[in-house]
């Protein structure tokens, strides 16, 4: 199957030469880009799509999420709280999640991501309630495959319950043996390391305040033995810093370095409270910058420009939908730009640099060299934007206006692995109306159940 994207107004490649082409064609054959150039003749049977007024970018890569949280947005009991009390309040709702809830939570999050230009996402699932089936990540993988998004699932974990000095209630933590066995099962069953892989697994203990040091070490050993990546939350709040100093006598980044959790096969979410010496300790690890979440939970401002100057791989992510509360990559791009400018003023990153973080930057953080760039031989993960709207009228720079004026409605088409998944705002691969009804009912039932049982 071939698709010819004809006469694209602007093609932003994010290739090594930072090339931006005008009035160009892109030919997609099977799941990859087979050529970019002018006046490409369509092969026999190719679908030709007129892109005269459209802008093409590599699809966004979202490097941090908790998809199940899409069913727990706007919970009045915790909505205005900072991270620790917010988590403590939400665990009471999350302890009721079922495989069905995880499936629908994933479908909702995936749909929002796809409609806002995201073609690859990760998820960090770490809540496995006692007495419930443990096949929750299997449900997410099923949903990803049905809807057609490129998916990096991470096997999260919590083992340090309240009775052992941790933050989560004991009912949502698991024995470390169970966690490691399930981690291995998921890698053996689903991890596909081939070029253009649509599903990968990584291992992701939740945070320094919800697992033991032993689990961090054993997880690291298993991941490196199996050749999968490592992920966790890190240096998100001052509360976390205090916890690590009291519990371990180390600041969060120092602790992770002690545990061997640094290097290019590791990426961390947030990384706000970090000093210059600690940036060097990361040793090639990546960071998922989550602007909305950091603002909502008043966690702080990620030192994005300093991290980049220190050679840290940086990307942009939506974070879980209870702390955002949306899965809108487009908004995250704009907020990353604005927050960077709040912190660095006229030395801040420009629109091109921010868009690069959200595309090629995310691919680099996830350890991929087959997505995030528009060039021959790369995966056909392409998003087409339409700036023919009143919101962009009078703007003199398409890249700047995409970041500063736009909203997700400018996504005209999302193509993943050579397949058109979103067209004119509609997800083509599922029955959105039916899914939405089921997801909302599942969410309401779970939240009302907890409220009745307080
Ligand atoms: Zn998170």
Image: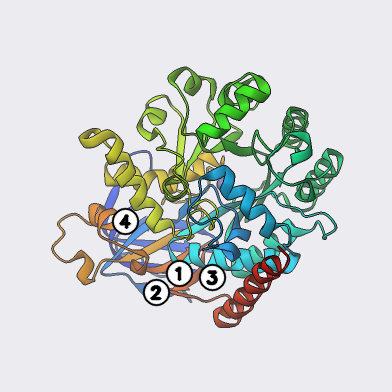
* In the displayed structure image, the side of residue 59 where residue 50 appears, left or right: left
Q: Is residue 19 something one can see in this rendering?
A: yes
The residue that mark 2 highlights is 48
Does residue 274 sit above or below 374 in this rendering? above
The residue that mark 3 highlights is 1
Q: Are marks 1 and 3 in contact (CB under 8 Å)?
A: yes
Which element carries disc 3, helix, strand or loop? loop
Percent x, y for residue 237? 51, 36
Percent x, y for residue 425? 42, 74
Does residue 390 sit above or below 120 in this rendering? below
Of the residues tagged 4 and 3, which is closer to the observer? 4
Q: Quadrant of the N terminus?
A: bottom right
Q: Are marks 1 and 2 in contact (CB under 8 Å)?
A: yes
> Local crowd at mark 1 within 10 Å, few (<14), some, or many (≥20)?
many
Q: Residue furthest front?
A: 454
Task: Determine the CA span between mark 1 and mark 2.
Answer: 6 Å
Which element carries disc 4, helix, strand or loop? strand
């Amino acid at each position: 199957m071939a698709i010819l994207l004809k006469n694209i107004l602007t093609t932003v490649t994010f290739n090594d030469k930072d090339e931006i082409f005008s009035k160009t064609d892109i030919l997609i054959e099977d799941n990859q880009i087979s050529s970019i150039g002018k006046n490409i003749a369509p092969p026999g049977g190719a679908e030709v799509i007129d892109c005269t007024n459209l802008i093409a970018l590599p699809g966004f890569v979202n490097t941090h999420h908790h998809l199940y949280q899409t069913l727990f947005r706007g919970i009045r009991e915790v909505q205005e709280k900072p991270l620790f009390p917010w988590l403590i309040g939400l665990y009471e709702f999350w302890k009721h999640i079922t495989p069905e809830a995880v499936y629908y939570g994933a479908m909702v999050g995936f749909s929002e991501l796809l409609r806002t230009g995201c073609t690859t996402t990760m998820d960090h699932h770490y809540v496995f309630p006692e007495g419930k089936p443990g096949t929750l990540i299997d449900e997410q993988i099923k949903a990803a495959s049905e809807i057609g998004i490129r998916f990096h699932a991470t096997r999260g974990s919590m083992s340090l319950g309240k009775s052992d000095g941790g933050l989560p209630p004991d009912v949502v933590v698991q024995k470390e043996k169970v966690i490691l066995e399930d981690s291995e099962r998921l890698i053996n069953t689903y991890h596909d390391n081939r070029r253009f892989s649509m599903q990968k697994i990584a291992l992701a203990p939740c945070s320094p305040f919800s697992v033991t040091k032993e689990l961090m070490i054993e997880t690291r050993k298993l991941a490196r033995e199996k050749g999968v990546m490592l992920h966790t939350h890190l240096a998100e709040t001052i509360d976390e810093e205090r916890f690590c100093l009291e519990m371990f006598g180390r600041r969060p980044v120092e602790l992770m370095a002690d545990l061997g959790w640094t290097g290019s096969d590791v990426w961390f979410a947030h990384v706000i409270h970090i000093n210059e010496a600690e940036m060097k300790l990361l040793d090639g690890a990546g960071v998922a910058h989550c602007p909305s979440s950091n603002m909502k939970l008043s966690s702080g401002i990620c030192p994005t420009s300093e991290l980049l100057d220190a050679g840290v791989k940086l990307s942009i992510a939506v974070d879980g939908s209870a702390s955002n509360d949306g899965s809108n990559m487009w908004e995250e791009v704009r907020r990353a730009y604005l927050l960077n400018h709040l912190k660095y003023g006229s030395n801040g990153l420009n629109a091109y640099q921010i868009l690069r973080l959200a595309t090629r930057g995310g691919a680099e953080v996830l350890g991929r060299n087959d997505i995030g760039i528009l060039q021959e031989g790369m995966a056909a993960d392409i998003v087409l934007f339409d700036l023919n709207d009143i919101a962009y009228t009078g703007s003199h720079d398409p890249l700047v206006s995409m970041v500063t004026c736009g909203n997700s409605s400018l996504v005209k088409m999302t193509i993943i692995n050579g397949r058109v998944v979103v067209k004119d705002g509609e997800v083509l691969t599922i029955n959105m109306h039916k899914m939405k009804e089921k997801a909302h009912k599942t969410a309401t039932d779970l939240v009302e159940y907890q409220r009745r049982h307080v």
